[in-house]
Amino acid sequence: MVPRLIMKLDVAEVRHEPGDVLLATLTHPRRPLLPAATAGAHVDVHLGDGRVRHYSLWGDPADRSAYRIAVKREAEGRGGSRRLHELLVPGASLMVSAPRNHFALPETGGPVRLLAGGIGITPLLAMAQVLAAGGRAFHLHVFARRRATAPLIEEARRRLGPGRVSAHLDDEPDTRVALPALLAAPEPGAVLACCGPAGFMAAVRDAAAHWPEEALLFEAFQPLADESFVPEPFEIVLASGRRLAVPADRSALDVLREAGVAPPASCETGVCGSCLCGYRDGTPIHRDVVLSPRARRGRFAPCVSRAVGTLHLDL
């Protein structure tokens, strides 16, 4: 697996949005065009102290002159967003990776429903711009507690035009909609893409339980939380036939590192997908929030996922 390109990019512009969100425009100091991104992609932003955070690109993927990210300050987070709010000033520089995409829309040709919870609008706005340019039917639904804390709604309306964006706000009763009613009848070939807080996405999953599995696309910004999960030891078999024991108190990624065969890694919480590898046989216990049900049939996140018994990896 080839590591991604990491570039030193300039902070060309910063703008404040509702919800304590900073919009940052990142450009290359010498090159007019950045590596191409597809709708739904994210970049890794290096904070300079060993920490790395991952942000979806919300700008038009056809515009390769800049990457546009939105950073919500999370008061109860691990400190990365607060640090980035300090670093994001015009004229500053940041180390930023080339884009990666684990949230790409399938090419069904059918209509697309985009459901965003709060800051989850970021990758969906990029998708909406591509869909609009391609003439594909879509609608962007944004859910938030209050208009005063909902970022990018007006930006979305400006970029997408009238009739394509609906804001459903808890403090504006006339705008609210029930998810089961909204998702009651999927059209043939329809796709549902959803991004937002864990509780919101769980509600969307429940309301869309009758949709075909291949029509559903979710992206999470936070690691899986399951305090009841008890890890058990398992075994990894490499392509060479080498066997590695993974104790209950260590990750497969740690064991692979010790053996000198670990894939590149970044977040190590199952969110970014940097360390994904293939597996050929075995019963994995998937604990990432990156892979779709279809992708989980052959991909594995060794930073957080585990297995029952023996798992054969393509490493």
Image (cartoon, grey):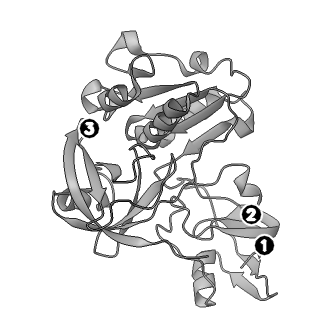
Sequence-wise first label, 1 or 3: 3
Q: Count residues near mark 2 (Cα–Cα under 10 Å), then give few for <14, some for 14-19, many for 20+.
A: many
Q: Viewer-proximal residue, 13 or 259? A: 13
Q: Which residue is mark 1?
A: 311
**As drawn, is 208 to the left or to the right of 308?**
left
The Cα atoms of the two marked residues, 1 and 2, are separated by 7 Å
Q: Secondary structure at mark 2?
A: strand
Residue at image point 31% right, 32% down: 155
Give coordinates of residue 152: x percent, y percent.
32, 34
| Residue 249 visible in the picture | no
Residue 313 vertical placement versus 92 (above, below): below
Which numbered circle lies on residue 148? none
Asked whether the beta carbons under mark 1 and mark 2 sit within 8 Å of each other, the answer is yes
Judge left or right: residue 259 versus residue 308. left
Find residue 19 and name its label: 3
Rendered location of residue 72, percent (x, y): 30, 47
Alpha carbon of mark 3 to alpha carbon of mark 2: how far?
38 Å
Residue assigned mark 2: 284
Q: Nearer the viewer, residue 116 or 27?
A: 27
